[in-house]
Image (tube, coloured by chain):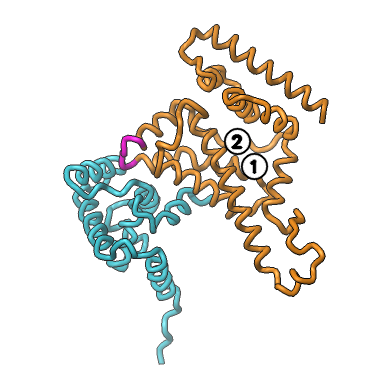
Amino acid sequence: MTGPKPLPEPSAEEGLRLYRALCNHVATAPYDFAAAFLPSLLAWVEERHRQVDEHLRQDAAHTAILSFVEDPTAYDPSGLDVAGYLRMSTQGDLRNLLQREARHHRRRVPWKVVEDSPDAGKYLGRDDDASFRLRIAEEQGPNDRAYEIVFAGCNEIERRVLELMHRGEKRTPVFAEVMGIGDRPKEEQRKEVKKMRDRLDKRLDRAKEDT
Amino acid sequence: MSNPLEALARRVEDNPFFLASVLARYAQAERLDDTGLAKTLGCTPETLTALRLCRTPRTEAPGFGEDVDCIAARFNLDGDRLAEVVRHGQALEHMAGPSASRGTLLAARDAQEDQASEPPEEGP
């Protein structure tokens, strides 16, 4: 059974155009940017974190969009495309929100209970901890453990390529851009990208066998 | 499904980077709800959401005129009317000073909504 079709997101080229409009202080650019990216970003965070409260998901996506709009210079166009950057930013914002919520809940436990508890002060990682739910969701992702192992041993470029692979990116020019070979002939790009992807695939396979 | 931009536009009402803050200031002073504000600007409520997410026009000339023209042209609005509303809202923001908080705006809006939602008084 297949899930709902993901909302289309702007192309990398469209993302760059909107980014440049923001950098040039075009008055309507913040609206254009939000209108282009917010729907697909909300759909993505809902799909990935269904178990997380809807308002927190929305808050994280909003924070990612607003941070980008207000300071587009923090984005490096030579790295991830805009959509990928926003997803990564949303993930980080969601983690922060959940950690804040977890802290808030822990503070609301009556002192008497805290004092009497044999687990006082310990992190228990239970269902009442919202950040625990996020970690569980992340751990349940496909082959995430192997991914983390390989990621830890990668250099900067390999990490970017691995992130793209993890997101299901297929387009050679996107990989080539991240690898810094976007100006080379297409056939050479294709070969280099394939070589890199094959190398990372092998590492992932080995890591899966080890875990 | 509701417009996903609506909640975002509401969130930035206290953020001076966005036109939403100036429009909120103007609407508060003129005691306008969304319908009234949209009517003043000559646009639909959907366009009002889009306007709120635009960047606040620069205050100095010629940047102010350029930014207002850009927004008016994009959403097919009367530039003079938009300029008047923005100038008014910016003046109110300036008078309120940097300490003016979101709380003030929200409290004012809550009060307006409370008044609007109160049932009419029954006659004798």
Magenta stretch bounds: A23-28
Instruction: Tell me the amino acid under the disc marked 2.
Output: Pro
Are the residues flagged by discs 1 and 2 in contact, CB closer than 8 Å?
yes
Chain of the residue under the numbered disc 1 shown in the image: A
Residues at marks 1 and 2, common chain? Answer: yes
Tell me where residue A169 appears, x and y as whole percent. 60, 25
Question: How far apart are labels 1 and 2 at the CA level?
Answer: 9 Å
Identify residue for label 2: A6
Q: Chain of mark 2?
A: A
Disc 1: CA contacts within 10 A as few (<14), some (14-19) or many (>=20): few
Task: Tell which of B113 and A155 is nearer to you.
Answer: A155
**Helix or strand or loop: what does disc 2 sit on?**
loop
**Residue at 20% across / 55% down in the picture?**
B84
Residue at left offset 74%, top offset 74%? A112
In the picture, which quadrant includes the C terminus of chain A? top right
The quarter of the picture where the N terminus of chain A appears is top right
Please state the horizontal and vertical placement of residue A125, each as a whole percent of the image: 75, 53
Q: Position of residue A98 (x, y in %)?
A: 63, 53
Residue A47's mark? 1
Residue A101 image-quadrant placement: bottom right
State which chain is coloured cyan: B
Mark 1, secondary structure of its residue: helix
| Res. B69 in view | yes
- Could you say which chain is coloured orange in the image? A
Q: Image check: B45 left or right of A115?
A: left
Residue A210 image-quadrant placement:
top right
Residue A142 makes an appearance in the image: no
Q: Is B84 one of the magenta-colored residues?
A: no
Which residue is found at the position 70% from the left and 56% from the top? A129
